[in-house]
Amino acid sequence: MRLPHIALTSLQFYETTYALYRKLFLRLKTKTLYLTTGYTQFSAIAAAQSLGINVIELQHGTFTRYHLGYSYPTQNKCIPYFANEIRCFGHFWPETTPLPIKTEVKITGAPYIEKLSPNQKQKVTKPKTIVFSSQGVISQYLYEFALKVAALIPEYEIIYRLHPSENEQDFIPVKNLKNFKISTRNPNIFELLKTTEYQAGVFSTTLLEGLALGCKTIVINMPGIEYMYPVIEKGDALCVDTPEEFVEKINDAVMSTNMNYYYADINETMSTG
């Protein structure tokens, strides 16, 4: 009986919050509702749209054709509880995810990414530096992979960057690899990527941010790699299966030919509307 109870509780919460939002919007004479994570705000969206209020969602993170909150491959009717407009980081996102056809898409960039100055076509890097972006669900496998890569190419500096939810003490300390270190919150991830020649991982959002910052990208074939298929197919990321293949093909990795495709230049989007 647990599932019926959850369903009933959720329905009651929706009805209550829907009524409260309608009263709030009427009292405030709201004209436009801005929100993030729209798939958790059904009652607010429904209440606003019932009053003719324009609902605009601001992209808050990664979404793909596999995301249940944004991917609608069957485009035969209006999708309820979805914003009238969604503002995306770059063209990559709406072009690779089947968003609802009746939702207007605008590209607004992502100001939280510190972009390179306009006159820097080639970023200043620390040659032979590789940043691995960890992820909780596969971190131990990726960590072991990075250690093997470090052992195979001692002339490279390997930085294993932890996810904000991870702690350094959860990983086995390494003493015999002088070219390997764990990075936590400092320096800022964008500052780190702006000076790094290579980045590696599986499906972290950081990989896409690194593409926008000019990193040469290598993706490891582990669970979750399907999220990066569009990037691999475009030729902006190299895919490898083993540490040995990683080392063998590292020189084949290249920078994206269009870094703004993933995170548009904020100044450009503002000037063009």
Image: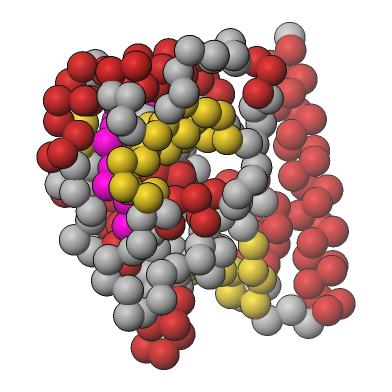
Quick check: 268 above or below 39?
below
Q: Which residue is drawn at 36% across and 41% down?
A: 129
Q: Residue at x 74, y 79 (%)?
A: 30
Location of residue 13 in the rendering, given as x and y in whole percent from the top left corner: 80, 41
Task: Name the residue nearer the viewer: 112 or 85.
Answer: 112
Number of numbered tags placed on the structure image: 0
Q: Residue at x 27, y 66 (%)?
A: 122
In the picture, measured across the screen, residue 29 lies left or right of residue 265, that is right
Q: Residue at x 37, y 37 (%)?
A: 130
User: Dividing the picture into quarters, in which one does residue 173 lie?
Assistant: top right
Magenta span includes 215: yes
Quick check: 129 above or below 121?
above
Magenta span includes 263: no
Visible in this render: residue 212?
A: no
Location of residue 61 in the rendering, given as x and y in whole percent from the top left corner: 52, 50
User: Dividing the picture into quarters, in which one does residue 120 lie?
Assistant: bottom left
Location of residue 190 in the rendering, given as x and y in whole percent from the top left corner: 51, 55
Visible in this render: residue 37?
A: yes
Task: Name the residue nearer the viewer: 270 or 15.
Answer: 270
Quick check: 130 above or below 221?
below
Magenta part of the protein: which range?
214-226
Q: Quadrant of the N terminus?
A: top right
Quick check: 141 above or below 35?
above
Location of residue 28 in the rendering, given as x and y in whole percent from the top left corner: 83, 79
Task: Name the residue nearer the viewer: 234 or 119.
Answer: 119
